[in-house]
Amino acid sequence: MLLRVENLGKQYAISKSFFSNKETIVQALDNINFELREGTILGVLGETGSGKTTLAKLIVKLLEPNNGKIIYNFDNFPRNVQMVFQNPFSSLNPMMKIKDILKEPFLIHHLDNGTDTDSKLRILLEKVNLSYDCLKHHPDEFSGGQRQRIAIARAIAIEPKVLVCDEPTASLDLSVQAQILNLFIKLKEELGLSYIFISHNIEVISFIADEVLILYEGKPVERGLKNKVFNNPLHPYTKILLSSDIGELQKTSAQDNYSGCKFYTNCKFSSDICKQMTPEEIKTEEGHYVSCHILK
Ligand SMILES: Nc1ncnc2c1ncn2[C@@H]1O[C@H](COP(=O)(O)OP(=O)(O)OP(=O)(O)O)[C@@H](O)[C@H]1O
Ligand SMILES: [Mg+2]
């Protein structure tokens, strides 16, 4: 086990208006539990606003949780957990040459020793299939796919254990997406990496993940080994997702702030208890967990 997330929760306070200091609380994530095992890819799947980026930021400690904790089963925190962002157009500094972008992690972590770093950059570029020549250029001279390769090279430069990838292919063309997904798989095998891989795209998660965590409005819906969850979905939301019959789901807004299941208003099977109580996560079989009252 590389890291374990226990009862993790995050709230944001938002000011109602510029003129008042009244705040509303958005529960962006609530009661999240999972483990990331060495050499595996955990796919986090959820629609927009389901809390995926919040989870990524908590894991790389860009945010502090309000509840629960993350246990890292390794030392050297910042070095061993690196992030790849969705948009390689904004995540690479346009003013810097690729050489300086790739050297930066070595400098930050005091691992730069001149010629040795240069040969490391050469190896790094080979790993992500870019030529050595690109070091002297700036990010705006590259395509989206090439920029994402540069961002990946930067993330793996100092040999982390875990990569947190927040929709890293969402801004790319379909054909390029497939190349980048294959690059992630190749690097995982070569470098013994583990990923928390976030996407709103079920096909991407289905292709890349070993285990999955499905979120709905900040709550865990269903999780476990991908084959168990995808071959035998148990939560009504997962069933809809996998049948591609997602249509127009009704959003629960802050006004209907009831304490029960977030999926209540959309669920064909809901009963009174679903409105009243948040379902607890239950283990239905080894490697398969579901949060739903109807399965009790
Ligand atoms: N800095 C913030 N302040 C207030 N609310 C926030 C903040 N960041 C996120 N939220 C809210 O928290 C919830 C979860 O947001 P988050 O960005 O984690 O979702 P997401 O699944 O990454 O969505 P997307 O697929 O659009 O990237 C949303 O309701 C969002 O509006
Ligand atoms: Mg996001």
Image (cartoon, rainbow, N blue to C red):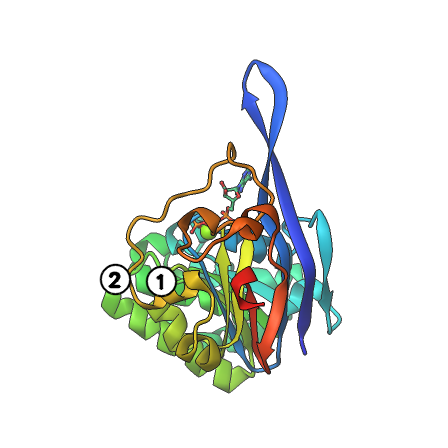
- The image quadrant where one finds the N terminus is bottom right
Where residue 281 sits in the image (x, y, percent)? 62, 65
- The image quadrant where one finds the C terminus is bottom right
Which picture quadrant has residue 82? bottom right
Judging by the rendered image, the residue that carries numbered circle 2 is 173
Helix, strand, or loop for circle 2?
Answer: loop
Disc 1 residue type (three-letter): Ile
Mark 1 or mark 2, which is nearer to you?
Answer: 1
Earlier sequence position, callout 1 versus callout 2:
2
Instruction: Look at the picture and state if 285 lies above or below 251.
Output: below
* Extreme-right residue of the structure: 75
Disc 2 residue type (three-letter): Asp
Q: How crowded is mark 1: few (under 14 residues within 10 Å), some or many (20 or more)?
A: some
**Residue at 48% in and 50% down:** 264
What separation in Å lies between label 1 and label 2 (alpha carbons)? 26 Å
Which picture quadrant has residue 181? bottom left
Circle 1/circle 2 CB separation < 8 Å: no
**Residue 264 seen in this snapshot:** yes
**Residue at 51% in and 49% down:** 262
**Residue 111 seen in this snapshot:** no
**Residue at 58% in and 25% down:** 15
Instruction: Look at the picture and state if 87 lies above or below 131.
Output: above
Judging by the rendered image, the residue that carries numbered circle 1 is 240
Query: Which residue is nearer to you in this view: 38 or 222?
Result: 222
Query: Which residue is nearer to you in this view: 70 or 103?
Result: 70
